[in-house]
Every structure is written in structure tokens, then in C-alpha cells.
Image (cartoon, grey):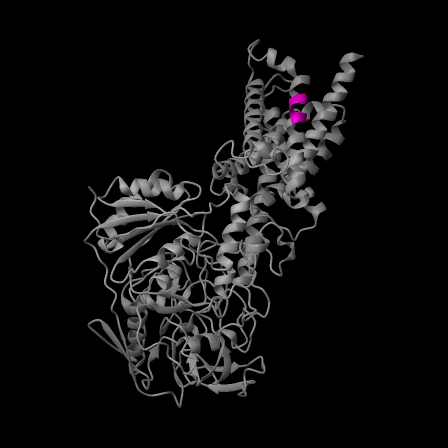
Amino acid sequence: MQAKTTNIIKRIVDMVLTVLLLFLMAYQVTGDVLHEWMGIAMSVTLILHHILNRKWYKSVFKGKYSPYRIVLTAVNTLMLAAIALTALSGVSMSGHAVPFMYGLINVMKARELHLAMSYWSFILMGLHIGLHLKAMTARLGSKGKSAFKVILTAVSGVGLWLFLKSGIVNYITFRTHFAFLDYTTAKWLIILQNLAMLMFFVLAGYVVSEVTQKNKDKKYSAKPLVWLGCAIIIGAVTNYALKEKSADNSFGNSSWQNSQSTTVQTTSNQTESVTEAQNSTSVTTTINDGFILIEGGIFNMGSPDSENWRIDDETLHEVTVSAFYIDPYEALQTDYEALMGSDPSTFDGEGLPVDNISWLDAVKYANARSNAAGLIPAYTIGDGEVVWDRSANGYRLPTEAEWEYACRAGAQTPFNTEHSLSADDANFYGHYPYEIEENYFDDEVLEARPGEYRQTTVAVGSFEPNAFGLYDCHGNVNEWCWDYYGAYDISQTIDPTGNENGTRHVYRGGGWNDFAKNMRSAYRAAGQADMKSYNLGVRLVRNADRSPIGLLTAKENVKLQKDGKILIAYFSWSGNTRDIAYSIHRRINADMVELTPVKQYSTDYNTVLMEAQEDQHRQARPELNEHIDNMEQYDVILLGYPNWWASIPMPIATFLESYDFSGKTIIPFCSHGGGRFGQSLTAIAKLAPDSAIGNGLSVHYSGGSTLDDDISEWLRENGIEEQ
């Protein structure tokens, strides 16, 4: 009687563990507080489970080990270790259930460990159940067992597809420390999805139990592998088919080379700020390049004070733009290579935009394309200067005003979509839609929810065009403009071309690794003429009739310093940037200083996320403990920081505004969680406009085993000798 009661209790405990596990893996359903308390309940229940099964531990070193017993022991041991590590990392991040244990281990490491171990616990729990499933289904008849296997196999196939689709492989292989969850799916469906995924591993455990135990003929049989094979085929085919369908719906062939002599339709969403008629104007081009005619008009350039995440350099002012032709697509790698002889792009693939080109590269490409088309080149390139003949009919970079006018297509909202961008609208860091910063822990209020982060450029024309028929104005690659960066001269109201002098050129639109806030139509990024980056490309334009005339000159006055005294200055929160700084310091002859704010940031990860975004939102300048009295002695500054919300931490902004960096070279190094530099290089370029900026080093978290080689290569690129 007692044994029967114990077995019933064991079954109840096992059921409770399974239910708790399903809900623990559904963070979207439980929320932060309940998740923590359910984790505590899971740990307590697991302890009870092991007390009830204490006889198993006593027998571990007794008797013979059959293949089945070896597998069962290995799975049980690994599951115990995984759950223990999940619990340890969980309490180290606790802000509710056991806050006194917060920081027991490094919080960043705890996040990464917790994410990986929780999914490993999930997988091993499924295998554990599967290994016992034969005993659980022993009372079923032969027909019942067959029906059960068919159902289990079908559900498992769907579960495998969900597992692959959810990117869990990245979690269990420690590639990320944050789970990007879908908050749009119904809560009950999330639980069912978790159950389906669990069933795949239950099936795997069941099949392993069958093939590692002898059948009635006292032989091992591989026949049960058929069931697992069927589930894998269902999952893999479904995953492939749905990916293909998504690709067919999203990615089209859009090369301008495929365009014939075209009649293009330009339309405008008429607003009060667009005063010239643009409705359904049909224009036949005389050059067979597929460019779209943008009729001139008046619009409000910049952003209103009410636009969230606007920056002070986006002063709202009225501008008149003359008509011009524009490429509906970003320049392609194939087109660039055909004219320039090489493709500098970071990514390789059919239909991808060229990236990793400088402003000077873009100017040279425009001239090469003009020559190939028999047009008058717009630019004369001399030693340290570029002269633009505004009357030339050749290809050129858009002015900043032309770019924003074309991007907006009549819209005065932050994006030309007239709604918040989602990953279905553009290629960007889809985990971070517009206004996610202040709603990070409650993104249900957002108009656009977190979505896919593709981590690469995609084929041009992959998303819906704007009202003028232009593709990828938001995201994919940033697009160089002619203008020098600087405060808007609001007295320039007709075809403005930016400041007469400067050290940085503007680029617009945001790239594949940018947050949505930095892809707003009004957002302005800037870099020196020789700056290249994995998210920098170009979209060409050319003049229409009645274009402005005259010559404009851009002189490049920024020169990199490779010799002289070096200072390593860095800000670090988790310790990753500090470790990188020390690794650099060991290799070179340099002074080093850590920048620490007088008012320290919280050591709690969740809290510092909010503190960082609040500081960035209001452009705070935290007071620093350190002051460098003799900054003039340094020629080269190696500037280190973590990528916080796609930019520099505000203590770095304080540092850059505290000294005169004219004539100095700033070489950034940045630790990040997936966004590389974000827009931090632009932030540095704006805050230290008279400095030169060297090639940066972006390090994923702590850098791993390649860090030493990466640092050495980076130092060589910047002409800094190692000791």
C-alpha cells in the first residue's frame, strides 16, 4: 500500500515538474515576478522528486550497465546539472523572489548561462520523460500504441519546426544572452507550442529507449528510428517550405539593370507641407536606367519637438526641392564591381546592396557610372578635394534635403510607412523597434513589436516601397549624401546643400544593425570622407530639367595620426570593455584611464538598462571622477565603451565634450551584444568634429578565443606598433 502511494506521489510530482517547466519556458505568459517564483517552486519540487527517487542514487554504482541504463544515467545526471545551473544563474539575477542573492555570479554571465541551461533542462526533461514512456504506455493495446506513436510523431514534427524557427539553437550554444520572445502570439498557444517542442524530445527519448533495450526476440532493433526519422522530416520540410514561402513573398529581383526604357508612375501622399502637385505624374525617361522622377516640392525637413528620440540637430524648417531622378534601389554589388573592378562588401549574395564604401568611393562610383552611360560626370576629384558641377547631367549623391524629401514621400511621421517600423517593413535590428528603449520590459504597448534580426543585408527591394516607389529608404544600408554635417542653415530654403565647410559627411536611412530610432526619416548620421563600414552604401540620383547650377567644393581636412603619445580611455560596466582595454594595454606603450561617473550606475542589469536609456534620451552628461590635466600631450586616443542602446554611454559623451580633440585621432573599441558599433561612431564624430577617427574594433561581449588576434590585427590596421 505504501509503495502504491509513493508511486502516485511520484507521478503527481513528475506532472507538476512538467507543467512548471512548460510555463517557465513561456516567459511571455508569466511575466517577471511569476517566472521567478515558479523557478523557486520548480527547484523545491525537483528536490522532492529526488528525495522520492533516492533509491536510484543508491543503485548507481551497483549492478551491470546495459545500453539503456547508460543512457538513462547520463540523461538524469546531465538534467540534474542543467537544472542546478539554471537555478544558480536564476537566483543570481533575481529581483523579486530572492533579491539578496543577486550578483552571486556575474550578471552578464548569469544571463547567458541561464538562457542556455534553461533550454538544456527543457531538452533533457523531454528525453527523461521519453526514456520512461515505454513503461507509461505499457497498458495500451497494440492499436492504441500505434495510434499514440502516429500522433506523437506528427506533433513532434511540428515541435521540431517550432524549435528551429524559434532560434533556440543560438541559445543552447551560448550565442546570445537574451531570448527574443514573441509577445503577439496568444498565451494559450505559446504553452501548446512549448508542449509540441517538448514532445519532439519525448519522442527522441522514447526511440532511444526502444533501440537500447532488447525486444521480445532478445535482440536490439533499429526499427523505432523510423518514427524519429519521420518527425525530423516533417520538421525539416516544414521549416524549409515556410522559409521558402517567406523568401518568395519578400525578396524580389530588383536590379536596375533589368529595367528597360520605362514609363514610371510617381504618386504622392499629399499633405499640407507638400504644396506642389505630384499626383499620378507619368514620365518617360530618356535614359534607360529605371530611375524615378521625383517632382519638386516644398516640405518640412527635420523633426518636430514632439517626435520621440529626436536629436537637437534635426531642427524643423521648410525647404523647397527641385525635381530630380533617383534610383528606386540602393546600388548593387554587381553594378559596383562591374564599374570599379572589385566588390568591397562585407556580405556576399545575389541582389545585395554594396556596402563598406566610403564617401569618396561613392563619389568615384557615381563618376564611373556617368562615364559608362555617356553622361557628364558630376564630380572633379583632385588632391584632397571634390568639386561638384551642379549643372552636370551625370550621376551623383543626393543632397541631404533631396534624400529626406524622397524618403518621406509626403509623410511627416517618423517613418515613411506612417506607422512604427516592424521587421516586416524593413531590414534592421528588429529586436529593437521604435520606442522599445523606454518600454523594454513591457513591449505590449508598442505599435511595432520586436521581430527578426537578420544580421546581414538583404536583396534590395525586399520590402514594400514608399509612396514614391523607393525601396529600403529605412534600413539595409545607410546611404551617403553630399552634404557636410553641421547645424542646419535654415536661411537655405531652396535646394540646400549643407554647410560650406566641415569634416564629416552625412549619411541617412539606417542599416541592417541599427535600432528603429536611428532609421527615422529625420535622423542624421555622419562620418569622415574615408570612413567605411559594413552598413554603409549609396543610392544615386541625377538632375532633371531646371536643376541648380554652380560649383561646390568639398575639401577633406581630416588626417589620421599614427605616431605620437597614446592614451587608452574607457568606460566599462560589466567588465568586458575593461578586459579588452587591459589586453590592448599589454601590447602597446600607452597611458590608460578608466572613466567612472561620480554617480555610479546600478549593478542590476535590468536597472542599468533603464538608467542608460534615460540618460541617452535626455542626453545627460554624467560628471566623471577623472580629469586629465594634460590632454594636449596625447595624439592618439583609444576610446573604449560598451554599445549601450546602439550608441555610446553618456559618460563617454561627457569625456568627449570635456577636451579639445582637434587634430587628434580617436580610435574606438566597443563591446557589444550583437549590434556591433550601432550609431556610436556617428555619436563620436559629432561630439569630436575636428578629430580624425581610425578603424574601430567591435568585440562581441568579451571576445572569446580570437580576441588577441583581433586586437593585433586592429592595431596593425591603425598603424600602431606592438611592444
Q: Quadrant of residue 678?
A: bottom left
Residue appearing at x 39%, y 53% in the figure: 652
Report the magenta residues as a range.
44-49
268, above or below 445, in the image: below
The kind of secondary structure the magenta stretch mainly shows is: helix
The location of residue 213, given as percent across then percent down, is 60, 20
Which image quarter is the C terminus in?
top left
Camera sees residue 224: no
The location of residue 702, given as percent across then percent down, is 39, 41
469, above or below 177, in the image: below
Instruction: Left or right? Give the position of 636 relative to 545.
Output: left
Q: Looking at the image, which is closer to me, 292 or 681?
A: 681
The number of numbered badges drawn on the structure is 0
Instruction: Left or right? Give the position of 650 relative to 361.
Output: right
Which image quarter is the N terminus in?
top right
Question: Which residue reaches farthest bottom?
Answer: 546
Residue 11 magenta-drawn? no
682, above or below 672, in the image: below
Q: Quadrant of residue 59?
A: top right
The location of residue 348, given as percent across then percent down, is 38, 57
Residue appearing at x 56%, y 31% in the figure: 101
Instruction: Left or right? Give the position of 388 relative to 152.
Output: left
The location of residue 688, given as percent across then percent down, is 33, 62
Question: Which residue reaches farthest right?
Answer: 1
